[in-house]
Image (spheres, rainbow, N blue to C red):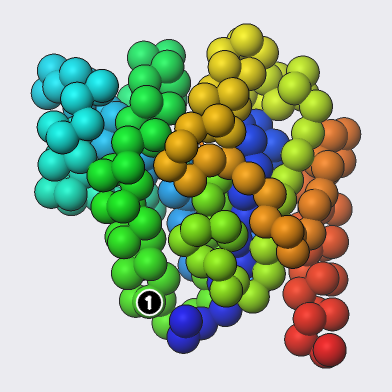
Amino acid sequence: MSHEIIAIDGPAGSGKSTVARALARALGWAFLDTGAMYRAVTCEALARGIDVHDQAAVGALAESVALTTLPRVTVNGRDVEEEIRTDQVNSAVSIVAANPIVRQAMVARQRRWADEQQLGTVVEGRDIATVVFPNATLKVFLTADLEERARRRGEESPESVARRDQADSTRVASPLRQADDALVLDTTGRDVGEVVGEIIACLMKLHLS
Ligand code: DC
């Protein structure tokens, strides 16, 4: 690993994207939302009429498509920034994310992306600290109450969020799991700046030790 990496994991609506984005901005580091990558592959599979349960077909798609997450989420040049948050994608993405061929392809892309950065990186997802970057400088696991997590997800119901958590935590391939050495932060009722400040304080402490 050539640069510093802060790995942020946690369930849907725990505040990962918001916190990771604000943290990257505060540090002047690059940011990667890996959930957007699984969502973009799901969008493309649905658009092409591929059965999301067909592991070989979706796996081949994940290996071959061109993906970007910033400044916009695109797949093969098509802007899917809004489409990745639709109900259809919310209910299919856990199936795509449980596909081991898809995971292998995404993990390789995520590592390649981090290698290409000139600065430190903040990467958020479900398996970032446990699988993708087990040697990350700092590992953070965010949690929050289900009600608050559903509220943050806007239109998505608590049942849908809970269903996705269950699927993400119990799948065979890289389930959502808290790394043993992660800093665990409950974001319920806390504002972004406070959580970001706590993570930066922890990073400073690591640098000084
Ligand atoms: O964080 P999110 O809700 O945008 O993630 C979308 C889906 O992708 C979610 O069901 C979990 C899955 N995911 C994953 O399995 N591994 C990651 N590193 C990131 C997301």
Q: Is residue 146 above or below residue 204?
A: above
Q: Nearer the viewer, residue 2 or 25?
A: 2
Which residue sits at x=13%, y=41%?
60
Q: Residue pushed farthest bottom?
A: 208
Which residue sits at x=44%, y=21%?
90
Q: Is residue 172 above or below residue 64?
A: above
Q: Position of residue 61 (x, y in %)?
A: 15, 39
| Badge 1 element | helix
- From this viewpoint, is residue 24 visible? no
Q: Nearer the viewer, residue 95 or 91?
A: 95
Label 1 lies in ligand 1 vicinity (Cβ under 8 Å)? no
| Residue type, label 1 | Asp
- From this viewpoint, is residue 62 visible? yes
Which residue sits at x=26%, y=44%?
101
Determine the image quadrant of residue 162: top right
Determine the image quadrant of residue 165: top right
Q: Residue pushed farthest front?
A: 172
Which residue sits at x=59%, y=24%?
166
Determine the image quadrant of residue 78: top left
Q: Position of residue 32 (x, y in %)?
A: 46, 56
Q: Is residue 97 left or right of residue 177?
A: left
Q: Residues within 10 Å of mark 1 (few under 14, many from 20)?
A: some
Quarter of the image with the C terminus in it:
bottom right
Q: Nearer the viewer, residue 136 or 85?
A: 136
- The residue pinned by badge 1 equals 115
Q: Position of residue 129 (x, y in %)?
A: 59, 59
Q: Is residue 200 above or below residue 182?
A: below
Q: Is residue 8 left or right of residue 167?
A: right
Number of numbered discs visible in the structure rendering: 1
